[in-house]
Amino acid sequence: MRKLIYLVLISYLSLNCGTYLLLQNQEPDDQSAFQNFVKLTLLDSSVGLVHYWPLDGDTRDIIGGLDLTAVNGTPSLTADRFGFPGKAYYYDGTGGHHQSAAQGPLFMDGTVSSYTVSAWVKGKFPPGNNGSEFIFVSQGAGLGLQLYAFAPGSCSGRLRAFTNNGGSGDVDVGTTCGQYPEDIWYHMVYTWDIQTLTASLYVNNVLASSGTFGSNRPWATNSFFQLGQSDLSSQLFVGSVDEVRVYNRAIFPVSSL
């Protein structure tokens, strides 16, 4: 009987693309089928990938060249979700964040392309009562991923993705209140499908929220791409961010993201 060996947490060289399943003592047909499966999985996870910040000790965009720099202080390196030191960034809420030197992806306004934003996050939920707080991935005032709380005691422990144009037409997809504890790593994937005008939020590879939107676009994303804060935020994010990716298509989140 064939032996099945699971090897986890193996990086795919520069893309750090995730988890592999390896077979030992396969028959030749099995080996070929498995090799094809791996190739297709890696290909699917990289098609449309236009920006990738591994955050493994620096803030270089190793795909699209949209490097980030520290602003208003220097966020500190911290351990990633695997416990490896210096492989993620911590934002302490005092103002230090990362920002691109140039305009972020133009298609983030939702008018010309589908897109996906993928990030790992671990942090605190805000103690205040403003739903625009603790945004950890943003572009201008028009796009954000956040740890959400609104009105102390009424809603916290919520993960949310949104777009903003100041009112009608905004996208708002989020989990239910009280679902997610603080200080635990979560994988958030936000997708915008321009063909169906559908926005979706996945948490740990599970669809958490979805809806059809789209009126009164574009959204206000004609600005810098940022980690650790947003132009909308009155209270800065406190927590860690890792493995941020942007795709110019809507994709289903798999373990390789």
Image (cartoon, grey):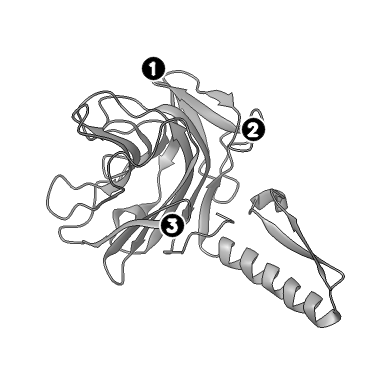
Is 147 left or right of 129, judged from the image as shown?
right
Q: CA distance from mark 2 to mark 3?
A: 23 Å
Q: Are marks 1 and 2 in contact (CB under 8 Å)?
A: no
User: Callout 2, which amino acid?
Assistant: Gly
User: What residue is at 51 percent from the left and 55 percent from the top?
Assistant: 50
Q: Image quarter for residue 255?
A: bottom right
User: How far apart are the two marked residues, 1 and 3, measured between alpha carbons?
Assistant: 33 Å
Q: Are marks 1 and 3 in contact (CB under 8 Å)?
A: no
Residue reaching furthest front? 1
Q: Which residue is mark 1?
A: 94
**Outermost residue to the left:** 168
Q: Which residue, given by chain and number where applicable, does mark 2 sit on?
A: 83
Sequence-wise, the earlier of marks 1 and 2 is: 2
Q: Position of residue 100 (x, y in %)?
A: 45, 37
Q: Quadrant of the C terminus?
A: bottom right
Please state the horizontal and vertical placement of residue 104, each as a whole percent of the image: 40, 45
Q: Earlier in the sequence, mark 2 or mark 3?
A: 2
Residue 45: x %, y % from top left:
57, 62
Give the residue pinned by disc 3: 206
Secondary structure beneath label 3: strand
Circle 1 packing at 10 Å, graded few (<14), some (14-19), many (20+), is: some
The amino acid sitting under disc 3 is Val
Mark 2 residue crowding within 10 angstroms, few (<14) / some (14–19) / many (20+): few
* Mark nearer the N terminus (1 vs 3): 1
